[in-house]
Amino acid sequence: MAGSDLTRLTVAELAERIRTKDVSPVEVTGAYLARIEALNPKVNAYITVTADRAREDARRAAEEIANGHYRGPLHGVPVALKDLFQTAGIRTTAGSKVLENWVPDEDATATRRLSEAGAVLLGKLNTHEFASGYTTNNDWFGPTRNPWDLERIPGGSSGGSGAAIAARLAAATLGTDTGGSIRVPAAFCGCVGFKPTYGRVSKAGVVPLSYQFDHVGPIVQSVRDAAIVLDAIQGYDPGDANSVRIAPADLLSGLEQGLRGLRVGLPVNYFFDLVDPEVMVAVSTAIDQLRDLGADVREVEIPHTDNLVRAWSTIVMTEVLEYHGPEFERRPQDFGPGLASWLSNPMPGGAAIAGSFRDIYAFTEGLRTVLEEVDVLVTPATPIPAPPIGPEVFEIDGVEHNGVSAIGRYMVPFNAARLPAVVLPCGFTEAGLPIGLQFAGRPFDEPTVLRAAFAYEQANDWHRRRPELD
């Protein structure tokens, strides 16, 4: 196959070609490296390209497979990591000037697990500075650009991860998600982004934004690919205090069960109170299709949403101030304006922090109660499609909103409640920008969330569409 054709294959398709020796990991890796060399200057998805390491990984994978030592569906598959994941011997910048020359001695747990699965490491991907925003307008490494429109943002903070998938610069990527940072780039770039239950995947060795709400997960081309990658990185890790000792989920065998009989909750409050008209049309059409596919769509009311974003923001702000405050005092010039403005705020008081946890717990209890009556929830992914690169104030119906309000408002709830959620494409605007649909479910019930998303995905071809940048 031609190199450009190889980069169009999903992980699942690529894995089968590699397993049967129809293509070599060396050939596939070469195709991706050539594409990165040609297109990364336009997209700016990568901070660091590890070409020599990738070729070495690919040669090793090819030899192992030729000798009958096939490790599984990621063996020989080229992947890339958001530059928050520690990589031994390879710099890990967190998109910052503070860590621009940091070379860790150890891999993050997720990095190591991908390596153990035989994946080929292509490099490290751009991120909003220290994962602190929704745009990936990075002051130190430049903005990442949305492959569907190079004058628009890819979302953040895992913008490099989403853009790399859309532009076919990696077969799979990892990102982190504190308030939508996996799912926003998936929505804006027309990809699949999956945030598992908090504690399903180790955060050990990942530069934090929020210890309370950070999640690790994949951004990929398809729901099946999300299951494959999550299967490789899931599992208990004593090196992460929040890791849960629970049996690994069977993420693949139930994908094709379909929607018939599945109870899908449609929120009547909060999740549709601020939506761009084109997003509303696409999401409403998708919900009608869920009914046609056999889902039992039921209206539900989500309690205790009034103070949710404020409570989440207070806790995140407290953690950002605690983590970065000392370094900011020593070298304020090495922090970008956006993060510096965060760090110039006073630390929230103890009563505010305690009250925020109370509000988060009340919301979580209410949401879990709703999920006893339905199997999954369906919502818009973001209120708007990808906005232009520029000032980080976003307009909806003539009213200006900040990033959480305009971009992350429908994702924050599932970080706050620590529940699994997946975003996948459900249409495009007249201007050709992707629109995302979100499914969320019960704690550690990733298989049902994936089942719902897969059934919708397979009834459409949205996930097969890719921008043409060549």
Image (cartoon, rainbow, N blue to C red):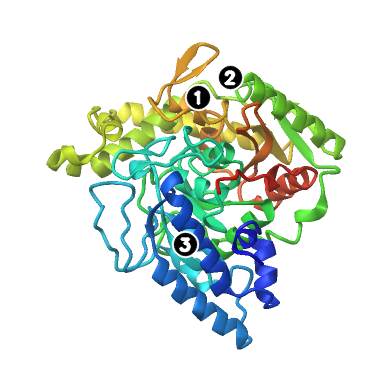
Q: Which labelled disc corresponds to residue 406? A: 1
N-term-proximal mark, 3 vs 1? 3
Q: Report the disc number at residue 110.
A: 3
Q: How crowded is the residue under tag 2: few (<14 C-alpha within 10 Å), some, or many (20+)?
A: some
Is 162 rendered above or below residue 78? above
- Please indicate, yes or no, whether residue 67 appears anywhere in the rendered image: yes
Judge by depth and name the residue closer to the eye, 429 or 359. Answer: 429
Name the amino acid type tagged 3: Ala
Name the residue carrying label 2.
274
421 lies left or right of 60:
right
**What is the spatial separation of the Cα atoms under label 1 and label 2, in whole angstroms?**
8 Å
Q: Is residue 455 left or right of residue 446?
A: right
Q: What residue is at 55 percent from the left and 71 percent from the top?
A: 117
Picture quadrant of residue 63: bottom right
The answer to whether the residue labelled 1 contacts the one labelled 2, judged by CB atoms less than 8 Å apart, is yes
Residue drawn at point x = 51 percent, y = 11 percent? 398
Say few, some or many: other residues with alpha carbon within 10 Å of mark 1 (under 14 / 14 to 19 / 20 or more). Answer: many
Which residue of the protein is positioned furthest toward the left in this rendering? 330
Most foreground residue, 209 or 92: 92
Residue 25 x %, y %: 57, 73
Q: Secondary structure at mark 3?
A: helix
